[in-house]
Image (spheres, rainbow, N blue to C red):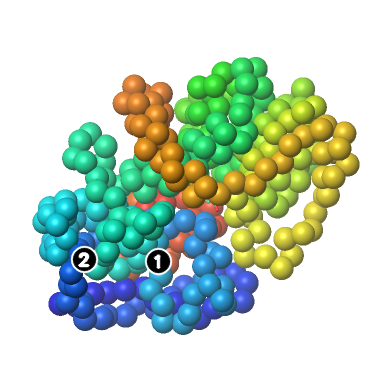
Amino acid sequence: MKNRQWVLASHPKQEVDATTWKLVEQDLPLLAAGQILVRVRWLSVDPYMRSKLNQGAMRIGDLMLGGGVGEVVQSNHAEWSVGDIAEGLELGWQEWAVLNPDIPGPARVNKLVAGPIAMQSALSWYGMPGLTAYFAMLEIAKPQPGDTVVVSAAAGAVGQIAGQIAKLAGARVVGIAGADMKLAWCKTLGFDDTINYRSEADLAGAVARVCPQGVNVFFDCTGGPVHDAVMANLALRSRVAIVGKVAVANKAAHEDLGLRASGKLIASRARVEGFVVYDWWHRREEGLRRLADWHATGALKFREDVAKGIGELPNAFLRMMRGENLGKQLVEL
Ligand SMILES: NC(=O)c1ccc[n+]([C@@H]2O[C@H](COP(=O)([O-])OP(=O)(O)OC[C@H]3O[C@@H](n4cnc5c(N)ncnc54)[C@H](OP(=O)(O)O)[C@@H]3O)[C@@H](O)[C@H]2O)c1
């Protein structure tokens, strides 16, 4: 049987474009003992994939790895049966995946239990992005009732959940995003205020206007100019969770440009902490349970942006990097 796969065609110098990948057709290998064959139904495109494209991370011809969900169609594993739904962070940009479910750690393949949660949610609010929002907000940023919390990339997969969790903690939440449609979605989710970073000439001034008492918690998904503008407005003893740097993902060599916040950090006695979701993987079940409870009661809403067909994977990744996605960017096969 043939399997269509997206593989790395070239290492991008800076900006990624569609020539970064090429679609190839491979024969499917026979299943070894302990393996399962999965027909991939949904794939995720995520900002972290940008750093995987660099020299030293992936070789030319390597399969593009990424989170996915699919249905088991053949099993040589005692605990997996045909019809089971498999979810994992390394299914890859392909139509069929031969997987070893027993791999430990974040690359482990998980079985989804049939129920009210849609299978693709395992790639968004009920998976890695949801867990990122949950642990970074509650364990690093720790919003208190009455705090002003600012979330960047607020309408994205992580941001929209992070903002809602801060609201559940009793905070006032301000979302920063790059399109008025996204700001409107944040308001629908209950965010108290929003800023469109693309239409503000003085971004630090806009943050000061919307956060007159300063920013107690900054949940930063972007880095770059948005980061600089919020850091200029930190309140006394504020907390900053550094979650992502999508704004500078294509400019790694120039990342260290912009307003330096050290003076502000000293004066505000702020705490800045980097975050990696896999450090919290041992508490994955707890996080998912909490997210599922909120979702079931309507306290957590979520929006997806779905492209269709394996041919759309590079475009879906590129539009997400350009900020054209509204909600979690997924591809349905
Ligand atoms: N540390 C961890 O363990 C961890 C885990 C998961 C995700 N992350 C990070 O969290 C961030 C959000 O990830 P996600 O999956 O939720 O993606 P996402 O927010 O759904 O999509 C990326 C968004 O980034 C924004 N963006 C792109 N270029 C930008 C720029 N130059 N300046 C400001 N914003 C820009 C765009 O929204 P706008 O229209 O608003 O610009 C775009 O929609 C990423 O940085 C990601 O790497 C970290």
Q: Which residue is at 34% across, 22% downward?
A: 297
100 or 251: nearer the eye? 100
Q: Residues within 10 Å of mark 2 (few under 14, many from 20)?
A: some
Estimate the x, y position of residue 91 in percent, counting from the top left: 32, 62
Name the residue at 64% across, 47% down: 274
Write down the quadrant of residue 80 in the picture.
Answer: bottom left
**Quarter the C terminus occupies:** bottom left
Answer with left or right where residue 231 lies relative to residue 23: right
In the picture shown, does residue 197 fall above or below 14? above
Identity, as a three-letter code, of the amino acid under mark 2 = Gln
Badge 2 element: loop
Q: Is residue 316 or residue 238 the one in the foreground?
A: 238
The percent position of residue 327, horizontal first and vertical second, equals 44, 44
| Res 272 → quadrant | top right
| Mark 1, residue position | 65
- Identify the mark nearer the N-term, 1 or 2: 2
